Amino acid sequence: MPLSIRYCFYPVMGDAIHGIIGDLIDAMSMACTTFGVCTSLGFGVQTINSGLNRLNSDIKADDETTQIVTIWIITCLATGSVMLGLARGIKNFSLFTFALGCFLLFALMFLDNTWYLLNVYTQSIGHYIQYVILVGFQCDAFEQLNYEFTKGSNLGWDNGNSMTGTGKLIQNVEAATNMEMADPMEYFGSHAMQFQDWWTIFYWGWWISWGPFVGLFIARISRGRTVREVILGSLMAPILYTFLFMGCLGALGIKWQRTAELALGVKPDINRGSIDCEAMGYVGGMPNSTEAIALADIGIYAIACRNHGDRMYDVLEPYGHDIGVFLKIVTLVAVVLYFITSSDSGSYVDDTISAAGMLDPPYIQRIYWAVTEGAVATALLAGGGADALSALQAVSIVGGFPYTFAINIMCTALMRAIKWDQEDEDIISKGKFVSAVTDFTEGFQPYNRHPRYPQAGKAWTSLLIGIVCPAAPLWGTLQKVYGSGAIMHAIGLSFSFYIWIVLHFIVLADGLAPFIGWTFFFGFIVHLAAIRVAVRDCWDIYGWAPEDFLCAMFLYPCVVGQMQHHTDCFPMLRDPETGRLLNEETAAPGKPSPGGSETEGSTPAVTGFYYPMPATQPPAMPPVPVGALPVPPPGWQGGVVQSSAPLVFTGGIPAPGGMPIVPTGLQTGQA
């Protein structure tokens, strides 16, 4: 398959990736890549300009013009790299940058207390293994509860309740007690309720926005390698190296921060994880008191009180002027090169996706994407003004949030692809629905549709009826699955669905009726998902209950139509009560061959990832000269005859549109 993100979804979405759904996936991937790289460029120029300021005080670190010029210098170098291509440009830049980073890392390890740094590395790995599950589930639930206890805060989810809506809880409680509520942060000693926004959500969004870029780039350079090699080379090795690099710099930062605290006699607030920078003699990130300036003169800074762009260079100061200048030059060059390699790799991935997976995109397109990334980063910094940092954080979250759902689908798709590749029985022996829930995006005329696929008019009718009356299209399906109990399921679906709608129009004093309605809608979704599970069991279709629930929740009319189409097109394979095959000889689907046919004795079901043709008796084929294009009789599809020898059918031969160019129903070994 071409090198494009849309094809990651094929095991789940099938041929729907060739339509508008695939276009949206690729467009979202390009947007995420661009936003992720631009966020990094925006933050990177702050670090670069701080390094230039340390080498030449005439260069202002916070000057907007200097930052924009820096962005365009990086953009020009990245454009040259991506023009040279993967082997000559991107690869050479990356190798040199990695070597420079390694030099800086080991220089710091040998210049300082090596034993201390290695201990921190080992200890940090242990802490990570011990706390990764705990911290991974940490949501700051009780800290964020303080939003309801704080005046003027924004819950972000106002349920309209007269007691617990935004601001109403405080108002009602203070009116009842005639007393002002205490400050929850002071009263409970909790850390800032905004911490998840400042840190967790921002970094999640930023990292996820890099997902399509890094994933596709690794896939490009890993072609021909095994899954084990990719996991070890692109996951395990970088993680261990990152632990070492971040552990070394982090340990040195903690060392110099503690040195400053002990020297200035200021203890940190360990409960809130903060330090009083004013007491330490720092104003606006700069040392201001006599003691703090004296410490800075010998290269020791309170790292926590410094500006974002200065902290990395502060770690390099205590080793003397000459060594410090040398290390700052190495660091500055390494940071510039790291951002060049990020920009050129991001541009290369955008080029590849926008060129429909072409491995060698046009040069003009390479220039376009490299320049676009620089232009977007410039717009964010210039347009953000004093809030440029917030603008960069916001764009990364905007880019990463929708891709969070896409990554979950990718994980499912990867699992299915591996199971299929390993020929696991649970997926090989199962079928799939004749239609997909996304077929409406293709006007119900999807690529490579099954011969028994419903007519577009019928599919649209089912979809439109399903929107306003979900039980109506499902009536035939319910009868087949539940027999005499079908009427109860139809009533249950209809009741919960219409109560959901009616409660939106009922006005109560406290305005809570719509939320009770959404409770009924949730019950409707659970019921519909349970019906889909039953249909999959009876028709031997591969799937997963959470998948049924999510499809029902977001696309319930499509799920209704999907079940109707399949149960109308194919006979039931298993007894709904016992789960046993109804006909052992004809119901068990055969394993499809790579060409798309099924083994002898298989049924015309939709099996695996392939669409077999219906089993009908083909007519006799008259002799045709070699190389001639025959006029196919009824039941045949045309093709060029390559040999005058008797034709033997050994498997389906895909043709445009995915239909085999062999007689419909011809069995293996038949001429």
Image: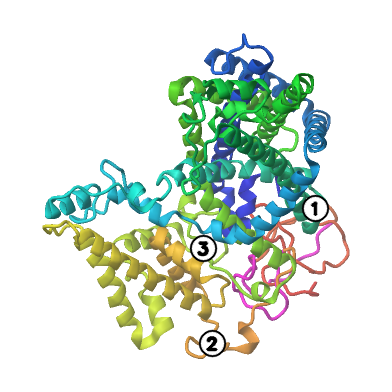
Q: Is residue 357 left or right of residue 185?
A: right
> Which amino acid, by three-letter code, is at mark 3?
Ser
Return the disc, 3 or 2, that comes first in the chain's sequence: 3
Whole-Å distance between the Cαs marked 3 and 1? 37 Å
Judging by the rendered image, the residue that carries numbered circle 2 is 579
> Which amino acid, by three-letter code, is at mark 1?
Ala
Q: Nearer the viewer, residue 562 or 289?
A: 289
Whole-Å distance between the Cαs marked 3 and 2? 23 Å
Residue 18, horizontal then vertical, whole percent: 59, 49
Query: Taking 442 as reference, is 624 above or below it?
Result: below
Query: Taking 655 as reference, is 381 above or below it?
Result: above
Residue beneath the point at 61% across and 38% down: 258
Return the disc, 1 or 2, that comes first in the chain's sequence: 2
Residue beneath the point at 61% across and 26% down: 310
Q: Nearer the viewer, residue 266 or 446?
A: 266
> Which amino acid, by three-letter code, is at mark 2?
Gly
Judging by the rendered image, the residue that carries numbered circle 1 is 628
Residue 153, horizontal then vertical, whole percent: 30, 43
Judging by the rendered image, the residue that carries numbered circle 3 is 435
Q: Nearer the viewer, mark 1 or mark 2?
A: 2
Query: Taking 415 as reference, is 99 above or below it?
Result: above
Residue beneath the point at 57% across and 24% down: 292
Q: Quadrant of the C terminus?
A: bottom right
Q: Which portion, as a residue range, is magenta?
A: 596-625
Residue 224, horizontal then vertical, whole percent: 82, 51
Label 3 Cα neighbours within 10 Å, binned few <14 / some 14-19 / many ≥20? many
Residue 14, horizontal then vertical, whole percent: 60, 58
